[in-house]
Image (spheres, rainbow, N blue to C red):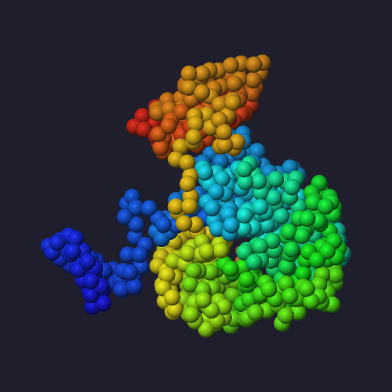
Amino acid sequence: MKVVRSIILGLASILLLSTGLAQAQILTDEAAAVASERGLSESDILAALKTYMPSGELDDYVMFSSGGQSGQVLVIGLPSMRLLKVIGVFSPESWQGWGYGTDAQEILASGSDNGVELTWGDTHHPALSETAGDYDGQYLFINDKANARVGVIDLRDFETKQIVKNPVANNDHGGAYVTPDTEWVIEGAQYSVPTSGTYASIDEYNEEYQGMVTFWKFNREQGRIDYDASFAMELPPYWQDIADAGKLVSDGWVFLNSINSERYTGGFEEGKSPFEVGASQNEFDYLHIINLDKASELVAAGRAETVNGFKVLPLETSAAEGVLFFAPEPKSPHGVDVTPDGKFIVVAGKLSPTVTAYSFQKIQDAIAKGTSEQDPYGIPILAFEDVVEAQVEIGLGPLHTQFDNQGYGYTSLFLESAVARWSLDGSSGEEPWTVVTKTPVNYNVGHITAAEGDTVSPDGNYLVSLNKWSVDRFVNVGPLLPQDLQLLDISKSGEQMQVLYDMPMGLAEPHYAQIIKADKLNPWQVYPETGWNPTTQAVDPIAAMPGEERIERDGDTVHIWMTAVRSRFNPERIEVKKGDRVVWHVTNIERAVDNVHGLALPDYNINLSLEPGEAQTFEFIADKEGVFTYYCSEFCSALHLEMAGYLMVSP
Ligand code: RUQ
Ligand code: CUA
């Protein structure tokens, strides 16, 4: 405990300056005793000092993490790793009342029009909106791999505004990513299917199944994806994996990797190799290099076909017009990440102990030079040696790469359970393209994310390792273990990286996250005006307004205009007849920060969260006779329990 003692004494001497000898001495002894009792090492104490956030102090960064199978987005403060919010996106979320009002129900039902109600999503990759390649704090996009959907979250109120269902893809691992000015949101499909949505025998896989990438046009003023201005590009039936947009010199291009260039179709039950073997035979798969600017020009010139009512650029057109090129990528590739300067595209190979850095300039030169190599669909294949700048011997199971402000790349090593720091082309001062250090993480890291790590100007400072396994890291809570998000300090150069904090994530498997400087976010504290509709982001003309509360009958429909304020609803008694359609408008007319009311109507499965100023509408058929209570489901005042009313449904 000598080390502990000396570091605490060191601390004490700093405190001494401000607090005086007596107090510092007390703290020293007490703190040293605590450290000793708890068996804390010097680096434990440093980690605690770097992450502890006194009450009322605010975090420097905000991390938006996918919520995995919860279909949600998680908002986490850094460096404290405190969970600040869960945003409902693809699944109902009852704290926020997400999915219980009419508007949210409609958004949530997007994609449910083929007769099956979708109530969950598998969120993988959140993407913050960007301006000139930097996060701008305005919007967040997130994909639902399971159902090929993309959600749009407005960061003025951290609520989901739109979900688009991809009409020509069945699933989408490769989303969401944005171009440097958020003109396009990229969504790559994964498992190839016939994009028309019709049946085709798996024996006709090579001809009748397609790969796909979709470019959703984002309208920033409206805060919505413009469905009609969006398009998809048909791709060969390889399994396109994840993507990244070019930036700066490579702006206008998109890079998408793929697996299963074998076009393997499974059949383990018939004695064939399973997918994991059959789809991993080739030494190389194909990095897809897409000229997005050219693709969108072709679509604008009417060269797209219509599939399921959606514009799709045919594969032959992309091949003939120089929109799509391939470069070999080793082996069973996974992550593809563009360096902050846009000059290199870094690809990790799950089954190759390297990361490969492709040079955008060399790609351009190789395209200009031309190639006679083609895949079976006529897509030009650029020669590996023509386009590769460097390969870094990185370790086992490399997956994803992030960047900092010191000229380093960071790659997650799934099999080694480590994060490797390596030098890019030289600005770090280390020998270019070499591993500098590795830091173990626990265990089996998938993605990593660095502060502002996908921008043209990363911050460094922090990196979060999103570990897939937690094994022995937390108290046993049964056979389904939490994921483990570990915070690393990457502020020092060279060999020093320190694991600072373990955050158990006990609500799903977060896949990827992005970290933004907290002061770039500027959300509302209360809605701008009373009667605000969060879906339209404007005052709702049908909102219930103070002084105009009433109940009106119109044939079999009963309209209720209700306000909520501490600590009462107005009206408090509502009488309808069995079978009536009830259309209920409710507005929280508070203007004070954090004065939220809920409106729960249990027997009709309603729960709304009404933030200050917010107006909501919901409706139902009063098909159950009886007396039902509605109450405020958010603790709002000492008389919160009295904030209630009766709904009486008479025969
Ligand atoms: S990819 S398994 Cu982001 Cu590593 Cu989804
Ligand atoms: Cu309003 Cu509780």
> From the viewer's perspective, is 108 left or right of 3?
right
Q: Residue most toward the left?
A: 22
What's the residue at 64%, 16% (across, down)?
554
Identify whether 252 is placed above or below 600: below
Pick the quarter of the image with the C terminus. top right
Q: Is residue 398 visible?
A: yes
Residue situated in front as seen by the camera: 218 or 92: 218
What's the residue at 73%, 60% (across, down)?
292
Where is residue 507? Give x, y as percent.
51, 55
Quarter of the image holding residue 213? bottom right
Identify whether 158 is placed above or below 591: below
Identify whether 355 is placed above or below 165: below
Q: Is residue 479 visible?
A: no
Where is residue 256? Give x, y as percent.
69, 66
Pick the quarter of the image with the N terminus. bottom left
Ligand 1: which quarter? bottom right
What's the residue at 85%, 70% (across, down)?
378
Identify whether 300 is placed above or below 468: above
Residue situated in front as seen by the camera: 4 or 235: 235
> From the viewer's perspective, is 136 left or right of 375?
left
What's the residue at 51%, 64% (across, down)?
458
Quarter of the image holding residue 186? bottom right
Where is residue 287? Give x, y as percent.
71, 71
Where is residue 219? Give x, y as percent.
65, 46
Q: How many marks?
A: 0
Quarter of the image holding residue 473? bottom left
